[in-house]
Amino acid sequence: MVPQRKPEAERRRRRGGVPPAVLLAALLAGCSPAYVLRAGYEEARILWRRQPIEQVLAAGAVDAGERTKLELVLAARDFAGRQLGLRTGGSYASLSRNDDAAVVHVVSAAERFRLQPYTWWFPVVGRVPYKGFFDPVRARREAARLEAEGYDTWVRPAGGFSTLGWFDDPLLTSQLRLGREDLVNLVLHELLHTTSYTPGQAAFSESFASFVGFRGAMAFFTGRGEADAAGRVADEWHDAVAFSQFLGRALPRLEAAYAAGVTVDERSRLFATLQRDWAAVPQRTDRYRGFAERTLNNAIVLQIRVYHERLDLFDAILAARDGDLAATLQAVIEASEGVADPFAAVAVLAPGSGLEAAQPLDAETAGDEEGGRAQGGREQE
């Protein structure tokens, strides 16, 4: 079953109901003009460099490895539209050459003794738990400002972002460095954002997109008869769900410790225990092993959680629809539209799973506090 596409007016309403020119004007009213103008300039450069992938392939301007991956992207787009009912439009039908592997540098911050993210507010998209910069120096400057105010911070590179359907997002040449499975995952993840986005609900939007990226890639490679590739994606999804469940158990304990009061040294020991506990969880891949080795703070933990909130719930909804991924996507999209708590709204789609009553760690951080997109409508991966 392929979801029926909604008319453009309805899709526009779900993405905020305003055309790009109005969106830009609203953003200029809500944040530094210099920030927005720089973001607009860099966005324009990316869009200006677009070349249709079909033309790139016809011109023979890429090597054999790049050709194979570009053909894979086109196949993934076709699968997304025909088999999953995602809105593809012109997204990922073009290639834009970029110099840096990290296009965007994302700043996130959080209180040091509470699992509460720092947020930025933008018109249209609401409060967001991260802010993106094309300039890494400006990103580090923002992080330094927040550190001076007493917040934990994290500056991370992001290899891609989405304009949520306002523009036809191109594939970037830096993304061709990804492995085949990760590349398909990325394309499907971003096309889900192009199709459906829940304003003010970053944890729901990102976790749903994580589900679509992994599960979609598994179905894509299975349909091509590439059992080995599908199996590798399945192993990574197994670890993603395990990590999601681990965070769901561990972070409430961490929050309870904060509420009781801890010193800096005690907090460090709490993080060390968290990492030892995760290292003891059986894992099939190396995707999440680095979590047990890196230096943690609350900004890192909360930003990671945004992409791993209740992943098993989406799997339960899929099981309730006998593994029909397209029907699952349609049901989740329809149930989550225009509701205050999308996790609660979609939980009813998996009756008897035991997951219906589960709640996010903090209702405040699951709502507007973790919603929207940084950089005036961009989503960073």
Image (cartoon, rainbow, N blue to C red):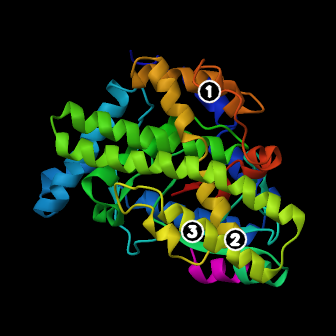
210 vs 292: above or below: above
The overriding secondary structure of the stretch rendered in magenta is helix
Q: Residue at x 59, y 54 (%)?
A: 378
367 vs 356: above or below: below
In three-dimensional space, the C-alpha distance between marks 2 and 3, rounded to whole angstroms, equals 9 Å
Closer-to-camera residue (15/84): 84
In three-dimensional space, the C-alpha distance between marks 2 and 1, rounded to whole angstroms, equals 29 Å
Q: Under tag 2, what secondary structure? A: helix
x, y percent for residue 89: 42, 35
Q: Mark 3 and 1 residues: CB-CB less than 8 Å, in contact?
A: no
How packed mark 1 is, by other alpha carbons closer than 10 Å (few <14, some 14-19, many 20 or more), is: few
Left or right: where does residue 39 sit relative to residue 81?
A: right
How many numbered dots are placed on residues in this image?
3
How packed mark 3 is, by other alpha carbons closer than 10 Å (few <14, some 14-19, many 20 or more), is: some
Q: Under tag 3, what secondary structure? A: helix
Q: Which residue is mark 2?
A: 270
Q: Which residue is mark 1?
A: 354
Which circle marks residue 128 in the picture?
none
Q: Amino acid at mark 3?
A: Gln
Q: Residue at x 57, y 26 (%)?
A: 332
x, y percent for residue 161: 51, 56
Q: Mark 2 and 1 residues: CB-CB less than 8 Å, in contact?
A: no
Read off the magenta span. 134-142
207 within the magenta span = no
Q: Mark 2 and 3 residues: CB-CB less than 8 Å, in contact?
A: no
Q: Which residue is mark 3?
A: 275
x, y percent for residue 280: 48, 62
367 vs 313: above or below: below
Q: Residue at x 46, y 50 (%)?
A: 240
Within the image, what quadrant is residue 354 found in?
Answer: top right
